[in-house]
Amino acid sequence: MHELAVTKSLLDIVLQKKEEMNLEKILSIQLVVGKMQNYEEEWIQRYFEYVSEGTPAEGAKIQIRYLPVSFACKECGTEFEYNVKTDDKILCPSCGNMDCKLLTGREFYIESMEAV
Amino acid sequence: MSDIKLIDIKQNILSDNDNQADIVREDLKKKNTYMINLMASPGSGKTSTILQTVKNLRDEIKIGVIEGDIESLVDSEKMKAQDIPVVQIRTGGACHLDAPMITPALDELMKEELDLIFVENIGNLVCPAEFDIGANLRVMILSIPEGDDKVLKYPLMFSVSDVLLINKVDTVEVFDFNKEKLYERVKALNPDVKIFEISCKTGEGISEWCNFLKERVNQ
């Protein structure tokens, strides 16, 4: 069910943008999603087709760019990726420090859309 | 046919909800009320935790509850039986609460003055993590029988929570639960999280949790 609520918000935003810019039809939508989120392109697409039926966004292709979960070491600044499924510890690969700051992984936004 | 244009948007998909959540938070601040978003799986002890907390703190602070459920009224009846002010939200299928659902429930509940409000979210570790409801503190419960590997399956929930309550610690001997491993995994994703080990059944750890909460509410 949360995909439905989310795709509705997504549709509202792109339709509003379409109005503002006086466009006719939305062809594709580019999303950025962090790997900590639970969104699969296939499902978002399917729900989007359902909610956008009969609107100028009908038929638009959803394209997701995934961002990894990544951290920066607070000691030496090294940036590194973290696999939530397999890694137990966050350890700076350069200096071994465990005090790190989350950089990416929670994103969920619309980057752009293609329209005519 | 006209040219295809690429339009820059850069907007959070849940921005409408987030804006409404900010309004809720401001409103609560004006009324000097502290709100907790309580999230967990079904059966982890959300309702028991609220009841235990109220029992411990009700002489000192005035507490109300917003119950989120897909259909039933079971939990809000438990609150009423203890004379706790309660408002029920029935989502009718939706698997999480969001800020627009909270707003009218809050208006209803705030007819009396309250220091603290618990929002018992829908039992689910996925979508409640994504929707800001305007709370001051996000608290999640993980109960021992659920296992120490839940961090791997629901990283976002563990990442966004300010407090983790490990409930049913009295059963740790029965289940194959590695606390050390859990702490490592949680602290990795969320180094600032406050962790309390509690048992709503035996009362273990409840006073530590309540003292922490009292301090936050009185801040």
Image: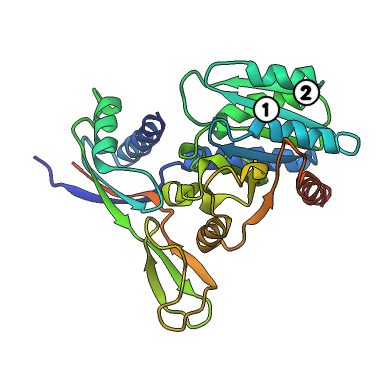
Residue in the picture at 72% in, 20% down: B78
Residue in the picture at 45% in, 76% down: A92
Applied colour scheme: rainbow
Q: Which mark is residue B85?
A: 2
Residue in the picture at 57% in, 23% down: B69
Q: Earlier in the sequence, mark 2 or mark 1?
A: 1
Kindly identify which residue carries mark 1: B66
Question: Looking at the image, is A104 positioned above or below residue A48?
Answer: below
Question: Looking at the image, is A84 positioned above or below residue B175?
Answer: below
Q: Separation of disc 2 and disc 1 at Cα?
A: 9 Å
Q: Residue A98: percent from the left, percent from the top?
A: 52, 73
Q: Residue A115: percent from the left, percent from the top?
A: 21, 42
Question: Looking at the image, is A112 positioned above or below residue B122?
Answer: below
What chain letter is assigned to the residue under label 2? B
Task: Name the side, left or right, on which B183 lies relative to A56.
Answer: right
Task: Name the side, left or right, on which B56 lies relative to B145.
Answer: right
Residue nearest the observer in this picture, A5 or A27: A5
What chain letter is assigned to the residue under label 1? B
Residue nearest the observer in this picture, B125 or B31: B125
Element type where label 1 sits in the image: strand
Q: What is the quadrant of residue A83 in the picture?
A: bottom left
Element type where label 2 sits in the image: loop
Q: Are marks 2 and 1 on the same chain?
A: yes
Residue type, numbered disc 1 = Ile
